[in-house]
Structures are given as C-alpha cells and as structure tokens.
Image: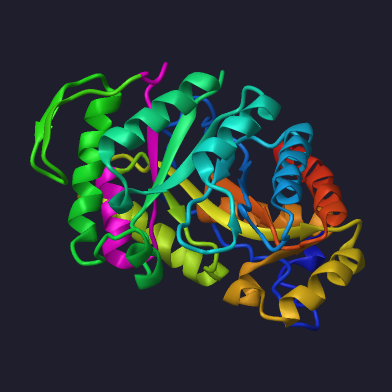
C-alpha cells in the first residue's frame, strides 16, 4: 500500500486517506460468529436505497446490479437502511432485501430499523421471515431515528422515542427467542408471539453518535455502528467512548462498524475525476474528510487506518450516481479486500 498517500487532500478538500493512528489498548471482540475473528478489517455494504430516477423499475434494477457486483467482489456483509415519508424513490428495506437475497450468497445480511416507528410483533415477523430466507446470518441494525417530517408522516411523536426504542428492542428480542410476551410497553400486548423464528440468534448492532446513544449501544447492543460523517479524529474519539462505556457496563466490546462513503478509481486521478464534482457540490452535507476516495492503494490504506483505530468493519456506500462507475468501483473493492486480507 502507498504510505505516501496517507493524509493527502485533493483540490476540492476531500480527505483521501485517514491518518494512521495507533491501535487502542482495549482489544476488539466480535460477537458475530459468522464474520468476527479479530483478523483483517471486514468490508461490507450499506447499499443505497434512494434514487433520483423517475423510473422506479430502473432504480430497483440498479440495486440488484450493485449487489451482484458486491457479491462478485467478495464483500462480506450486506445491509439496507430505512427512511419514511420521503415522497421520492426510496425502496423499503424488508421487501427489497428479500429480492436481493436471491443474488447475495452465504455472507451475513441485515437491515436498519428505526425501532420507535415499529410495532414489535410486526417487526419480529419481518425479521424472522428475512432470516429464514438467507443461508447466512441475519443482523438487526437499529437506531433511534429523528426528524419531525419522518415521525410526523408516520403519526408517531418524537417525544418519548428513547423509551420506545428500548422497550421495543426488549420485546423484539423476546419474541425472536420464541417467548410469549405480555406487556404494556411500548404497546399493550397480550400473549404475543411471533413466527417464523430466526434459524440462528439475531445480533443487534446499534447506530449511535451522541454520547447518550453511544452509551445505549454499549449497554444494549452486540455492536455499534459509527456515523458516516465522522472525521478520522471524531471516529477515534467515539470508538474510545464506546469502549469505555462497554467497560463501565461490564460488557465485552462488540462489533465496531463505521460507514464510509467511497469511490475507488483505477488510480487516484481517476477517482478524483469522478468524485471531485460530487464533493464540490456538498455531497450529503458530509465533511469531505469523512469520504474515502482514491485508487486501490489509497482506499486500502484508509480502511487499514480505521482498523488501527479499532474498527472491525467498514460498511461502504458509493457516492457516485453513475451506475457504470459504481459497478467498476465495486470490482476494485475486491482488490481492496485482498489487500487487507494480506496484512
């Protein structure tokens, strides 16, 4: 890998490579038996679900093609996000993931659910059904969610969402374990059961950025997902906070994942050709230094640097719109994965 590229900034201001920092003294443990082995950084996919195309069949076809490309590149996990009330072309995760499982293979899969918006029985049934469709492990990602527009569109108040999140997660876990649940929180349930049950236990990764949320992930989750907009310095601070909270709660450090929006070019100049106009336009409001843009060597180094911070998984999402560029970038991610496996 090209160590000279470490920390290079392109003319638009995007940090191409995260600075290398020493590995923390607290060991990273991974509760996900299907992936974790304390070995090289694992590269998974947080596939984009929102598209600007007016042809909704075209957007869904793009998702299928991208997941095929990720599979062919040997990427190690697949996830879809969740958002509601957008009014645009945003494909919902449960039915779309069911379609994508026909393309994926045996590697773990999962979806992000905003728990405060869900009835726990309905969600348990969705998760159990998806888990029964995949030969690999199913992972439940979850987060608090926010936004008056999103919660308002669903008829759910923002106030009280933390308590609903925690009670929904508790009930969901009991239902997925095959228990009968009678409770008044988050809703009045009487002798509730769910089926089908997942063939294997479902691990829970919690997305969190604010200090109370990171503490909640350490207290309740099997893993923590860092936000995509963290700079390398912020990522270093937050993973240390997560570790400290795990220790405070007497729990082992779980999966430590971070999303990174990326483009892998044939080389650095080719990556800049694609990414510079997107970054200059203010891509998703993310700090440029949180993006990973470069050739295989630069991207491999950036991901290795995240591993040096203690992250066990990086979940990639492509920042380019052009389908051919995204598919080519996925192919090069296969080479990145090979680089990291050789470290």
**Residue 202 at x, y = what percent?**
39, 29
Looking at this view, is 195 or 207 the one in front?
195
Q: Residue 111 magenta-drawn?
A: no
Q: Residue at x 77, y 59 (%)?
A: 263
**Residue 251 at x, y = what percent?**
26, 41
Using the image, determine if residue 181 lies above or below residue 256. Answer: above
Q: Which residues are magenta?
A: 196-220
Looking at this view, is 341 or 171 the one in front?
171
Q: Residue at x 45, y 52 (%)?
A: 225
Total marks in image: 0
Q: 211 left or right of 300? A: left
**Residue 42 at x, y = what percent?**
61, 40
Using the image, determine if residue 127 lies above or below residue 292. Answer: above
Using the image, determine if residue 270 lies above or below residue 173. Answer: below
Q: Residue 214 magenta-drawn?
A: yes
Task: Specify the quadrant of the image occupied by residue 254.
Answer: top left
Q: Residue at x 48, y 27 (%)?
A: 130
Task: Specify the quadrant of the image occupied by residue 159.
Answer: bottom left
Looking at this view, is 217 or 175 the one in front?
175
Let me know if residue 96 appears in the view.
yes
- Quadrant where the C terminus sits is top right
Q: 246 left or right of 67? A: left
Let me know if residue 1 appears in the view.
no
Type of colouring: rainbow
Q: 340 left or right of 241? A: right
**Residue 81 at x, y = what percent?**
52, 50
């Amino acid at each position: 890998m090209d160590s000279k590229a470490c920390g290079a900034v392109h003319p638009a201001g995007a940090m191409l490579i995260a600075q290398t920092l020493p590995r923390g003294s607290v060991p990273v443990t991974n509760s996900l038996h299907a992936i974790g082995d304390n070995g090289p950084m694992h590269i998974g996919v947080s596939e984009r679900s929102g598209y600007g195309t007016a042809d909704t069949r075209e957007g869904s076809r793009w998702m299928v093609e991208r997941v095929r490309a990720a599979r062919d590149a040997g990427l190690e996990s697949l996830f879809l996000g969740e958002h509601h009330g957008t009014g645009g072309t945003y494909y919902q995760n449960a039915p779309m993931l069911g379609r994508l499982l026909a393309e994926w293979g045996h590697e773990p899969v999962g979806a992000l659910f905003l728990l405060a918006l869900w009835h726990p029985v309905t969600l348990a049934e969705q998760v159990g059904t998806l888990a029964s469709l995949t030969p690999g492990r199913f992972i439940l990602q979850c987060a608090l969610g926010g936004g008056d527009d999103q919660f308002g569109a669903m008829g759910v108040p923002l106030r009280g969402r933390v308590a609903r999140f925690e009670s929904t997660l508790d009930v969901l876990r009991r239902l997925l374990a095959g228990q009968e649940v009678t409770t008044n929180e988050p809703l009045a349930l009487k002798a509730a059961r769910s089926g089908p049950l997942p063939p294997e236990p479902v691990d829970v990764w919690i997305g969190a950025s604010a200090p109370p949320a990171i503490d909640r992930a350490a207290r309740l989750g099997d893993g923590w997902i860092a936000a995509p907009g963290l700079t390398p310095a912020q990522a270093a601070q937050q993973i240390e906070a997560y570790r400290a909270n795990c220790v405070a709660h007497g729990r082992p450090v779980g999966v430590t994942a971070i999303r990174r929006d990326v483009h892998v070019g044939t080389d650095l100049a080719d990556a800049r050709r694609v990414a510079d106009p997107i970054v200059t336009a203010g891509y998703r409001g993310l700090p440029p230094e949180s993006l990973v843009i470069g050739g295989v060597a630069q991207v491999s180094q950036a991901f290795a640097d995240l591993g040096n911070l203690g992250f066990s998984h990086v979940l990639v999402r492509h920042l380019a719109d052009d389908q051919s560029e995204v598919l080519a970038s996925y192919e090069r991610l296969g080479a990145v994965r090979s680089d990291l496996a050789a470290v």
